[in-house]
Image (cartoon, rainbow, N blue to C red):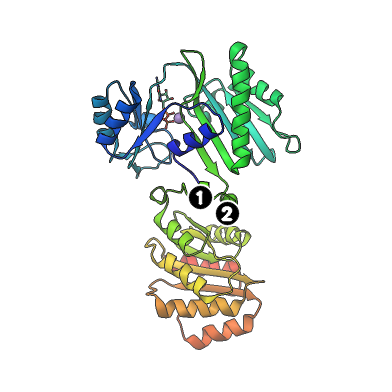
């Protein structure tokens, strides 16, 4: 789960990371009032869950409250297109109004779960402000990575290695190590998967300040962080993914193709999507209903799929282990009774209570297309989807 910059800065501030004074505003009038309260020149920034806002026109300076009102009027309500939003862009509903910083140098600092290293890695670069992917491809030696030994946790020497790579020595060394340690503490305490500060700046006054902040959390740990879960902004998420979550289906991800997939288990989801691609098609989603033991869950899965008009065929691929095939079959039958299903449905079932499931489907007389293995199911789904 992602959060907005203003939420990330509040969180980081609680962990002792220096951030500028700021307010948020949803109207130009509020932005003007915020600038008046701050009593200094401000920067007004669009709050969307994507980076690259500066280049897209979503970050503007304002020296007076009147100017803040004016630029907020330009930004609020705009559809901001950045390299991270895709062509459709993202509607701006809110801005952060914060004290302008006199910047001496822009640096890059992040902490993330590094799957290749199998642990937490801290990344720093003196080339801040620009996309780290760009620095990585044009000037990879400008990026310093320090892996954290999980058993030992964060040690000051790791902070010093990063600080030196950022050119933070002398009077800035101690605050830099402290800042990096605080960031690590926040990362672990809140089960984050990424904290990125780009840029972290050295101000003209000679102190460190996080000018931008992006934080992503591990969805699987949200159950133990009510404060973080409460920061979810459904406006920034795919409406069908939000609905799926509300229906208790956590494993739903929308993709670009036209074949809806209902599976149980992430591994089966992967192999189902691979089989569809191999058969020349493209999945419209990844819908993992997990271990289903109630019929309503299957009906809810259909509810999500039928609300998505890019879905031209539905492929149900279930291996009943803990889940039972007869429950799935009954769910398919009930879904056809309760919902208006216009697209072809391809069913491949195996495992526990298979005979009972087969009986339910054949006695229902529904026009579902049957397949006995995954390859056959994928080929039939691709054909049915056209
Ligand atoms: P992003 O484009 O979405 O990553 O938004 P950022 O918050 O990182 O802002 C983009 C750029 O705007 C930064 O890299 C800075 O160069 C500039 N910027 C943002 N805030 C300030 C500020 O307070 N003072 C100055 N001088 N520049 C700023
Ligand atoms: Mn940035």
Can you tell which mark lies on residue 223?
Answer: 2
320 relative to 28, above or below: below
Q: Are marks 1 and 2 in contact (CB under 8 Å)?
A: yes
Q: Is 200 displayed left or right of 239 in the figure?
A: right
Q: Quadrant of ligand 1?
A: top left
User: Which residue is most to the top?
Assistant: 170
Neighbourhood count class around disc 2 (C-alpha, 10 Å): few under 14, some 14–19, many 20 upward: few
Residue at (62%, 76%) from the top-left corner? 324
Figure quadrant of the C terminus: bottom left
* Residue under the point 63% across and 74% down: 350
Q: Which one is earlier in the sequence, the residue at label 1 or at label 2?
A: 2
Instruction: Identify residue for label 1.
Output: 229
Q: Secondary structure at mark 2?
A: helix
Res. 65 mark: none
Most foreground residue, 313 or 187? 187
The Cα–Cα distance between marks 1 and 2, rounded to whole angstroms, is 8 Å
Question: Which element is circle 1 on?
Answer: helix
x, y percent for residue 61: 32, 24
**Residue drawn 27% across and 22% down?**
64
Residue farthest toward the bottom in the current orientation of the protein = 363
Image height check: is 241 above or below 175? below
């Amino acid at each position: 789960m992602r959060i907005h910059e203003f939420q990330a800065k509040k969180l980081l501030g609680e962990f002792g990371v220096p951030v500028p004074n700021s307010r948020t505003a949803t109207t130009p009038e509020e932005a003007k009032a915020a600038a008046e309260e701050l009593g200094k020149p401000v920067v007004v920034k669009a709050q969307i869950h994507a980076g690259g806002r500066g280049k897209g026109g979503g970050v503007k300076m304002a020296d007076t409250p009147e100017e803040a009102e004016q630029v907020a009027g330009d930004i609020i309500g705009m559809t901001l297109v950045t390299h991270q939003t895709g062509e459709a862009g993202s509607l701006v509903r809110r801005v952060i109004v914060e004290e302008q910083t006199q910047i001496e140098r822009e640096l890059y600092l992040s902490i993330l779960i590094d799957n290749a290293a199998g642990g937490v890695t801290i990344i720093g670069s003196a080339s801040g402000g620009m996309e780290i992917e760009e620095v990585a491809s044009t000037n990879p030696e400008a990026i310093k990575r320090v892996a954290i030994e999980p058993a030992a946790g964060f040690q000051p020497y790791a902070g010093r290695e990063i600080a030196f790579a950022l050119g933070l020595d002398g009077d800035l060394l101690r605050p830099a190590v402290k800042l990096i340690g605080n960031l690590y503490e926040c990362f672990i305490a809140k089960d984050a998967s990424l904290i990125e500060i780009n840029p972290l700046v050295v101000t003209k006054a000679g102190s460190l300040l996080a000018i931008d902040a992006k934080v992503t959390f591990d969805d699987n740990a949200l159950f133990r962080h009510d404060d973080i879960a409460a920061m979810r902004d459904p406006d920034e998420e795919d409406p069908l993914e939000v609905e799926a979550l509300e229906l208790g289906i956590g494993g739903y991800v929308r993709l670009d193709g036209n074949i809806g997939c209902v599976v149980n288990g992430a591994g089966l989801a992967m192999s189902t999507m691979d089989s569809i691609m191999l058969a020349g098609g493209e999945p419209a989603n990844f819908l993992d209903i997990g271990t289903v033991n109630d019929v309503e869950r299957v009906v809810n899965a259909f509810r999500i799929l039928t609300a998505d008009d890019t879905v031209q065929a539905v492929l149900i691929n279930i291996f009943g282990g803990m889940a039972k095939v007869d429950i799935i079959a009954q769910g398919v039958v009930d879904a056809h009774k309760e919902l208006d299903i216009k697209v072809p449905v391809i069913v491949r079932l195996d495992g526990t209570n298979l005979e009972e499931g087969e009986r339910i489907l054949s006695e229902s007389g529904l026009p579902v297309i049957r397949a006995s293995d995954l390859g056959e199911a994928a080929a039939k789904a691709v054909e049915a989807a056209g």
